[in-house]
Image (cartoon, rainbow, N blue to C red):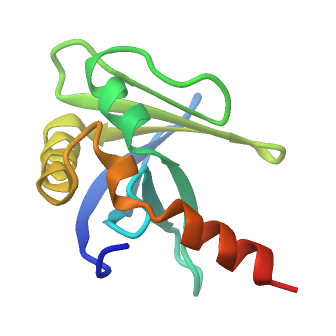
Amino acid sequence: MMNSVTVSAELSLSLVVPEHGAVPLVASLDYCADDPYAIKMAFHVGTDEPVEWIFARELLAAGLEGKAGEGDVRAWPQGDDDILNLTLSSPFGEAHFEAPLRVTAEFLRSTYGIIPAGTEGDYLDVDNELRELLSQP
């Protein structure tokens, strides 16, 4: 496993509220080489702790090009408007966000500078991960 090399970005995005317009929010995107398949998105909503979602880096990449995701996280571009739509679902409801596509794409490109797309498995020590998992009480 690598050292904890990370890439982070801050996004100004909008929570789309039907019949009420959009609510501006700030979210941070984090990518860590220790978990090469995952992107963490944290929404800062005025509480002590942000609301965090973790989803596949590949899903975000696919969502920049067209509709991606089946389930809790879906992403798709909005025409030529430089907008990336994100829908997050949980048992408590669904939220639709609009994020700046260009900023999100720049963040994603910077993650490929750490670990190129398609090589994520080369950076995992599966045997060690299993050992750690199985040794936990």
Find residue 70 and report its image quarter: top right
Residue furthest front in the image: 127
Please give the name of the residue rendered at 38% of the width and 56% of the height, measured from the top-left corner. 36
Find residue 98 and report its image quarter: top left
Q: Relative to the observer, which residue lies in front, 59 or 16?
A: 59
* Total tally of numbered discs in the picture: 0
Q: Relative to the observer, which residue lies in front, 77 or 68?
A: 68
Q: Is residue 67 above or below residue 123?
A: above
Q: Residue 66 location in percent, x, y?
A: 34, 14
Q: Is residue 62 above or below residue 110?
A: above
Q: Relative to the observer, which residue lies in front, 59 or 83?
A: 59
Q: Residue 90 location in percent, x, y?
A: 75, 44
Q: Residue 8 location in percent, x, y?
A: 25, 68
Q: Residue 112 location in percent, x, y?
A: 17, 49
Is 94 situated left or right of 101 in this image? Answer: right
Q: Relative to the observer, which residue lies in front, 127 or 98?
A: 127
Please give the name of the residue rendered at 23% of the width and 45% of the height, measured from the top-left corner. 104
Please give the name of the residue rendered at 43% of the width and 61% of the height, measured from the top-left corner. 124
Position of the N terminus by quadrant: bottom left
Position of the C terminus by quadrant: bottom right
Residue furthest right in the image: 137
